[in-house]
Amino acid sequence: MSDPRKLFIKTYGCQMNVYDSERMAEVLGASGYVTTDRAEDADMILLNTCHIREKAAEKVYSELGRFKPLKAANPDLKIGVAGCVAQAEGEEIMRRQPLVDLVVGPQTYHRLPAMEQTLRDGGRAVDTDFPDEDKFDHLPKGRPRAKRGPTAFLTVQEGCDKFCSFCVVPYTRGAEVSRPVARLMAEAQDLVDRGVREITLLGQNVNAYHGAGAGGEWSLARLIEALAGIDGLERIRFTTSHPNDMREDLIAAFAEQPKLMPYLHLPVQSGSDRILKRMNRKHTAESYIDIIDRLRAARPDLLLSGDFIVGFPGESEADFEDTLALVRRVGYGQAYSFKYSARPGTPAAERKDMVPEDAAADRLARLQALLSDQQRAAQDAMVGRTVSVLFEKPGRLPGQMVGKSDYLHAVHVTDARATPGMIARVRITASAPNSLAGELA
Ligand code: SAH
Ligand code: SF4
Ligand code: F3S
């Protein structure tokens, strides 16, 4: 028998892409591919791409250019582009980069085996449909039974109907769809059977989840409650949420559900109501703060994370100061902030009142300084406390294990008793720039 063909996948963008890359590897696994982490060894290279900002999309083309020598050395090598750039640009990718044999959008990768056959027959394949069938129904049943690491992603909801004026996601991922409860319960049970102890539920708008379950549509809170009943599943997280879908039952879950971890990523984008309106966010700074207050009433130690955009068209210095004020008011333990990037096809890209580049860069630097102070303070405040840590893998130093605290801080412990998959109480002894150190309590 000949060696199995080798597949190299490189993943960009959000966690949803990480999940999708695993699924693509499984689909192609059924066609005889095994994954490799060396592009030079591959028979097929797939880039699973992100279109959210200009830089993310441009990276894809520079990466593709680097595969030229590989293709020259191995004319049978197939190169594919998957994900959100594939969805947004389709065939255009092949015009810009003739090395590309395959373009597959985020909703059609269950059709990869047929596309792969087309490539082997000497053709090229492009599929960026939003098909009627659900790709999840057409993925190989019963994933490989191999054991896996202690943490996993599980996509429960996909797509977005919010149409924030700056964002490509509603166009690249399509309309909001929730997967049925029974499917998710089965997938979660399978993950737990294979060693997973923490599941992060994924969706572009995960808290808008409204999947079909017993007796009708279930909310995310109800799904979490059911998942919490799975023996051996110790930790549940979810991301990413929109403030307007932060329902009362979900807020209450932070108080009532011990398996739901005290960490929430709740992007606000701006602290200025004028800008929020132009962004079509449909919430105000005050309504966001009100949600945070209610969340903290339910779970006082909740660690908050957020996303921010500076330099949105028309943003004045006063608008930006409103963002700084909101950040000071909320206090973030973690945050991501970006300079606005005009994306083709989005309403905001039509605006003429662009913020000059140097002003946007200056605002980003000021915001990031404030956010990183807050992040550092939240982390330093852990020193002396005892937290629960799920160990994931060996650290860089001999005998060291690294894991995540309930608050998602990376924690290093040097102790032979710590093993991957173990959850232990750890007393935090020191705080470094991006991690904590501690000892088993
Ligand atoms: N669904 C998530 C966000 C997905 S995109 C949500 O609604 O929160 C992740 C982050 O990228 C966004 O929260 C936003 O801060 C940033 N982003 C999206 N489009 C952008 C653009 N055009 N320019 C700069 N940042 C952008
Ligand atoms: Fe994009 Fe807004 Fe949807 Fe988030 S809620 S994915 S920012 S359109
Ligand atoms: Fe990027 Fe698509 Fe995720 S644009 S952020 S990979 S949904």
Image: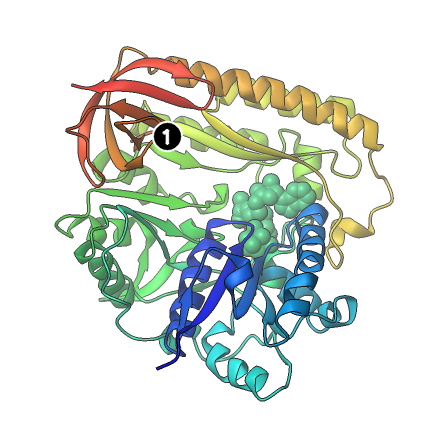
221 relative to 258 in the view: left or right: right
Quarter of the rendering occupied by the C terminus: top left
Per the image, label 1 sits on a secondary structure element best described as loop
For the residue pair 258 and 247, the one nearer the viewer reads as: 258
Label 1 packing within 10 angstroms: few (<14), some (14-19), many (20+)? few
Residue 211 figure quarter: bottom left
Is residue 162 visible to the viewer in this orientation of the structure? no
Q: Residue at x 22, y 49 (%)?
A: 225
For the residue pair 95 and 341, the one nearer the viewer reads as: 95
Instruction: Find residue 325 and report its horizontal and vertical position in percent.
Output: 60, 19
Quarter of the rendering occupied by the N terminus: bottom left
Instruction: Find residue 278 and report its horizontal and vertical position in percent.
Output: 71, 43
Instruction: Find residue 310 and report its horizontal and vertical position in percent.
Output: 69, 32
Residue carrying label 1: 396
Residue 89 figure quarter: bottom right
Instruction: Find residue 80 and report its horizontal and vertical position in percent.
Output: 60, 69
306 relative to 60 in the view: left or right: left
Residue 404 figure quarter: top left
Quick one: which residue is furthest to the bottom in this view? 121
Q: Please state which amino acid type lies under the numbered disc 1.
A: Arg
Is residue 295 visible to the viewer in this orientation of the structure? yes
Quick one: which residue is furthest to the left in this view? 231
